[in-house]
Amino acid sequence: MPTTEELAIALAEDVLKAVEETGDEALVNDINKIIEASSSALQEAYMAAIRAQRSEAKARQMLDARLKRARAAQAAKTG
């Protein structure tokens, strides 16, 4: 049986994919309210997973942009 954290991570991944597909940001909070009504432990883990996944995505965007700039600068020097 999956742990509460594993369930929360999987749910958060699915919800964020649905938000990306539909553009419906309210989905995160709607799901949060449903979970909160029955399991505070799952609700806390879900919101932590949402925040972590969104933070990781922003960090990757910044990393990708920096790498792109650095590679372009390197190519300009050698090219």
Image (spheres, rainbow, N blue to C red):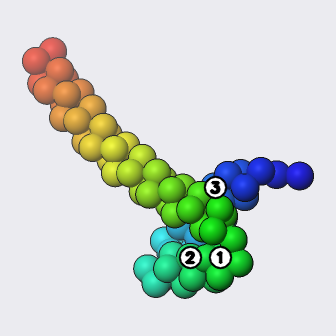
Q: Mark 3 points at which residue?
A: 9
What is the spatial separation of the Cα atoms under label 2 and label 3, in whole angstroms? Answer: 13 Å
The image's mark for residue 16 is none
Q: How crowded is mark 1: few (under 14 residues within 10 Å), some or many (20 or more)?
A: some
What is the spatial separation of the Cα atoms under label 1 and label 2, in whole angstroms? Answer: 5 Å
Q: Which amino acid does label 3 sit on?
A: Ile
Horizontal side, residue 77 vs residue 5: left or right: left
Q: Residues within 10 Å of mark 2 (few under 14, many from 20)?
A: some
What is the spatial separation of the Cα atoms under label 3 and label 1, in whole angstroms? Answer: 13 Å
Vertical arrangement, residue 8 with respect to residue 74, above or below: below
Of circles 3 and 1, the one toward us is: 1
Q: Name the residue under label 2.
A: 32
Tell which circle, 3 or 1, labels the residue nearer the N-terminal end: 3
Q: Name the element at disc 2.
A: helix
Of circles 2 and 3, the one toward us is: 2
Q: Name the residue under label 1.
A: 35
- Between 27 and 22, which is closer to the camera in this rendering? 27
Work out whether residue 75 can be spotted: yes
Q: How crowded is mark 3: few (under 14 residues within 10 Å), some or many (20 or more)?
A: many
Residue 37 position in % (x across, y down) = 65, 82
Q: Which residue: 61% across, 76% down? A: 36
Q: Which residue: 44% across, 57% down? A: 51
Evaluate if marks 1 and 2 touch, with contact meaning CB atoms under 8 Å apart.
yes
